């Protein structure tokens, strides 16, 4: 991770969960930080914590409120980062929202909103930052996807779909950017990690969040983030971060999709009992 010291890193979704922990660990490493999310006061809380425990000063950290669904603001946000730091070494596309409801009961607005946040928002910000990286012929775009971009689960269809879309996009990007060997596209696929993702998940309607947590085994946020930073520093392209049982499922979906589907149906039946 020491390779990351002194770099300018822009983290979206920095007000909570994985993004918040990324800010803490990156500030300890002495990276310059741009913290984005919608809630400014939460970003300020994260900034204070970074300054308290980190190896950086006030001038090394920029709070930049940003809504992934408001794509008209992304160009100006990118300009603001460049004005402040003169470059963007790493963009971490981490902001996102989950889904917890059945397909039959979910309104189309929810499917649309999840594509707007997780997919189109990420595509838009990536497109704003790319010309700068192409001009410098260097940079990293790290996208926090999900194992649910590889496997599918029940009651999170809108989320699965948006993350599968993201996987398609970033891998196309990786191929297209091949003529610039120093622009690295790194994709992270975490399994269940401690965060507020379930609490903030959309349900049947866009106005209704899940609001609670359910007891499943999750990896500690700090462990996941340390692995993300190691993967980033070493230019790893495809990174699966999870406890073994979910990894096994991911391998099944990757190599034996029809077996994975049958197994998932059996698991679902058992879980419903
Ligand atoms: N936790 C897991 O188990 C897990 C597993 C695989 C992948 N992931 C992915 O990890 C990433 C981070 O999630 P998390 O687990 O840390 O969840 P989290 O604690 O709920 O954090 C989500 C972050 O995304 C931001 N966000 C949500 N909607 C946004 C919008 N419209 N515009 C801008 N920012 C927005 C939130 O900030 P504001 O509300 O302030 O905007 C928050 O900072 C997500 O992409 C998620 O899909 C998580
Ligand atoms: C859909 O919503 C109805 C009414 O709230 C509920 O009774 C039913 O169990 C839900 N269906 C599924 C598949 O979640």
Image: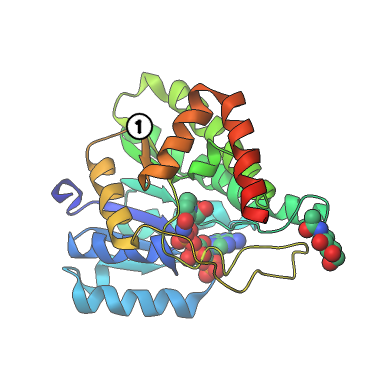
- The vertical placement of 39 against 73, above or below, is below
Q: Can you give x and y, in whole percent of width and height, for residue 250 in the image?
A: 47, 35
Q: Residue at x 31, y 52 (%)?
A: 86
**In the shown orientation, is residue 252 left or right of residue 182?**
right
Q: Can you give x and y, in whole percent of width and height, for residue 44 in the image?
A: 40, 78
**In the shown orientation, is residue 21 left or right of residue 211?**
left
| Residue found at the far top of this picture | 179
Q: Can you give x and y, in whole percent of width and height, for residue 108 in the image?
A: 82, 52
Q: Residue at x 45, y 77 (%)?
A: 42
**In the shown orientation, is residue 186 left or right of residue 7?**
right
Count of numbered circles on the image? 1
Q: Can you give x and y, in whole percent of width and height, for residue 20 in the image?
A: 38, 66
Residue 214, picture quadrant: bottom right
Q: Secondary structure at mark 1?
A: loop
Residue 233, picture quadrant: top left
Nearer the observer, 193 or 45: 193
Q: Which residue is mark 1?
A: 237
Q: How is the image coloured?
A: rainbow
- The answer, for residue 37, to whether it is visible in the render is no
Quadrant where the image shows the C terminus: bottom right
**In the shown orientation, is residue 141 left or right of residue 31?**
right
- The vertical placement of 129 against 169, above or below, is below
Q: Residue at x 50, y 66 (%)?
A: 215
Check disc 1: other Cα within 10 Å, few if <14, some if 14-19, many if 20+: some
- The answer, for residue 198, to whether it is visible in the render is yes
């Amino acid at each position: 991770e020491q390779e990351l010291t002194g770099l300018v890193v822009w983290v979206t979704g920095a007000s909570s969960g994985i993004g918040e922990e990324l800010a803490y660990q990156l500030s300890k490493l002495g990276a310059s930080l741009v913290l984005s999310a919608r809630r400014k006061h939460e970003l300020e809380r994260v900034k204070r914590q970074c300054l308290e425990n980190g190896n950086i000063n006030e001038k090394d950290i920029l709070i930049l409120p940003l809504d992934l669904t408001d794509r008209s603001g992304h160009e100006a946000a990118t300009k603001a980062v460049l004005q402040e730091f003169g470059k963007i070494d790493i963009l971490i596309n981490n902001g996102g929202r989950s889904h917890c409801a059945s397909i039959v009961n979910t309104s189309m607005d929810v499917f649309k909103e999840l594509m707007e946040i997780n997919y189109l928002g990420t595509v838009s910000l990536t497109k704003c930052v790319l010309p700068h990286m192409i001009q410098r012929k260097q940079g990293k775009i790290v996208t926090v996807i999900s194992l649910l971009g590889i496997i599918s689960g029940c009651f999170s269809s809108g989320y699965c779909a948006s993350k599968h879309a993201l996987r398609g996009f970033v891998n196309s990007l990786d191929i297209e950017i091949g003529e610039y060997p120093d622009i690295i596209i790194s994709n992270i696929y975490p399994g269940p990690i401690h965060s507020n993702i379930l609490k903030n998940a959309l349900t049947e309607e866009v106005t209704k969040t899940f609001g609670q947590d359910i007891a499943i085994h999750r990896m500690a946020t700090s462990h996941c983030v340390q692995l993300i930073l190691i993967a980033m520093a070493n230019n790893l392209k495809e990174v699966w971060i999870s406890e073994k049982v979910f990894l096994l499922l991911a391998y099944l979906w990757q190599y034996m999709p029809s077996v994975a589907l049958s197994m998932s149906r059996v698991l679902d039946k058992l879980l419903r009992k």
